[in-house]
Image (cartoon, helix red, strand yellow):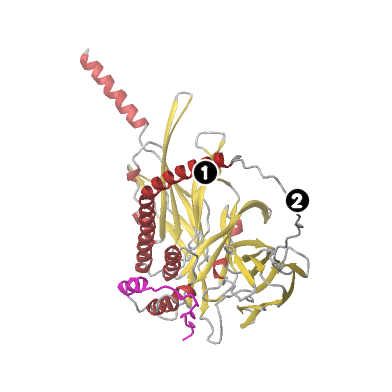
Amino acid sequence: MVNRLIIIFLILSSYTSSAFAVTKVEASVDRNPVSQGQYFALTIVVDDEVGGELLKTTPLLKDFIVGRTNVSRSTQIVNFDTAKETRWQILLAAKKEGVANIPSFTIDGVSSNPIALQVVSDKSPTTANSDVYIETELSHDQSYVGQLLLYKVKLFLAVELQRGVLNAPTADGAQIKQIGEDQDGTEIVNGRRFRIIKRIYGIIADKAGDLRIKSASFNGDVLVNTQKRRSMFSFNESRPVEIDSTTKTVEVLEKPASYQGNWLVSDLVVLNEEWPQDQEEYELGAPITRTLKLLASNADDNSLPSIHYSLPDSLKSYPEKPVRKTYVRNGNMVAELSQTEAIIPTKPGKFVLPELKVPWWNPLLKRQQFAVLPARIIMVKGSVLPVTEPTNSIPTSNVNVATQYSAGYWPWTTLVFACLWIVTLLMWLKKKGAAPVVKNEQIAKHSNHLNQIEKEMKHAFKQKNYSDVLNLIQKYFSQKQNKNMNLSEITALSPLLAQIINKLQMARFGQKEVEITELELFQAVKSTIEIHKNGQKSALIDLNP
């Protein structure tokens, strides 16, 4: 009896194991032909639950770039019939044009059929037939050091996006940042409706030469319609996607030797002013609010120079902190610098606000131009009232007046003031004891802030990010002097510091390699002297060789 049960158990075990053994391995691709360098999905399905490590993808490396691999398992029970499945999804990109072969894959002795892929050039117009693709556009093929390039990206989606990331382009020797927010919309392309995601990046080259911009890319998962095996219904299936576009090359030119002034490259620069008062005469001592606005098309707001000019001695200026911003107007990037100041006349008369000129380089005409604000004449009226001696207008008389003497309220007033004086004295003594502690805490906090800036400066110098080093020098001395300082003012602190800043400027704009060490940099920072009250000429030299 026992032997009979053992035999029955072995028969059932062998039947169960054979029922769930691998009997079929299928391989398929989501499209054929494919574009060279563009990712497509290879799907391999096994009709059983097996380990993910059983699939060997090494043979694919001969003709393909192997990307992300996803493994999933599922079990279906229909009318007590159990079906198990293991699915691999592999992202592949063909290395060259022609015919690329996907070899057969063997799992538990069962093999799939090989697939012959037709690989076409990545320049062929096949993207519009894809479910997901990217288009990129660059504003210029040639630019100057410091010029803003607009890199526009359009992501086309004909299927539902489950999750994904749109990655920024990359380039050595350039600053890249996103400008504005993403724009989401729809378009009809070749009779198909696509969801369109638009994004704009700003690219500024730090040095001259050929700038290679590696394309923006997208990787994520989309939902595609598919029909499961042994099912009459279709389902949305998650499929990995990884795509990019072509690499672009831009010729970056040096700053022209003939250029004079602060370097600014733009398609158009305008300088204007705002006067809240629509009048020609102003009252003595009354503030006059003046706002200067510098606007540059297709430029970065950080490249806009501050506006400096001199007023007559009888006009006192009280400026506010400049405001910088970048925004999109009519499809163009606009950088804006706004400087507001209050002008207070201290004497009456006629005064001339001088003409203002901001130099800039026109890359279309390849010549230097100026944004000009004409001189303005203002009239200040009013006068200081003369100080007159008081006259005694009360006539004297011989009337005898009987005088009564009374203390009145003066004793009480004296008593109140005495009490207040004692209370004030006690509070002053208490505050005097606590003041050194507060002062020491402020000094320690100030010193810690400067030390942190020094650490950031050292890190930026080691990374050869000279633009950040210059910004940190400006931040360091603004904190140290307790006021906003530009590089021109900082160079007046020390001749050694002026030399270091000049070398950093040259290295930043690609004229030559920096010839200073980290020790020399911090020796210059520590060698500063106080600015003379009568001012010093900036030691910044022209960056032209």
Residue type beneath disc 1: Phe
> What residue span does the magenta drawing correspond to?
517-545
Horizontal side, residue 46 vs residue 272: left or right: left
User: Crowdedness of circle 1 by 10 Å Cα count: few (<14), some, many (20+)?
Assistant: few
Secondary structure beneath disc 2?
Answer: loop
- Image quadrant holding the N terminus, namely top left
The residue sitting at the top extreme is: 1
Residue 466 falls inside the magenta stretch: no
Name which residue lies at 33% across and 44% down. 54
Q: Position of residue 68 (x, y in %)?
A: 42, 51
Closer to us: 426 or 437: 426
The answer to whether residue 145 of the structure is visible from this angle is yes
Residue type beneath disc 2: Val
Closer to us: 215 or 105: 215
Q: Earlier in the sequence, mark 1 or mark 2?
A: 2
- The answer to which quarter of the image holds residue 86 is top left
Name which residue lies at 48% across and 82% down. 543
Q: Position of residue 293 (x, y in %)?
A: 65, 68
Which label is found at residue 248? none
Secondary structure beneath disc 1?
Answer: helix
Q: CA distance from mark 1 to mark 2?
A: 38 Å
Which label is found at residue 417? 1
The answer to whether residue 297 of the structure is visible from this angle is no
Q: Position of residue 400 (x, y in %)?
A: 73, 49
Q: Position of residue 133 (x, y in %)?
A: 56, 57
Above or below 223: residue 504: below
User: Crowdedness of circle 2 by 10 Å Cα count: few (<14), some, many (20+)?
Assistant: few
Circle 2 residue: 399
- Secondary structure that dominates the magenta span: loop
Horizontal side, residue 519 vs residue 100: left or right: left
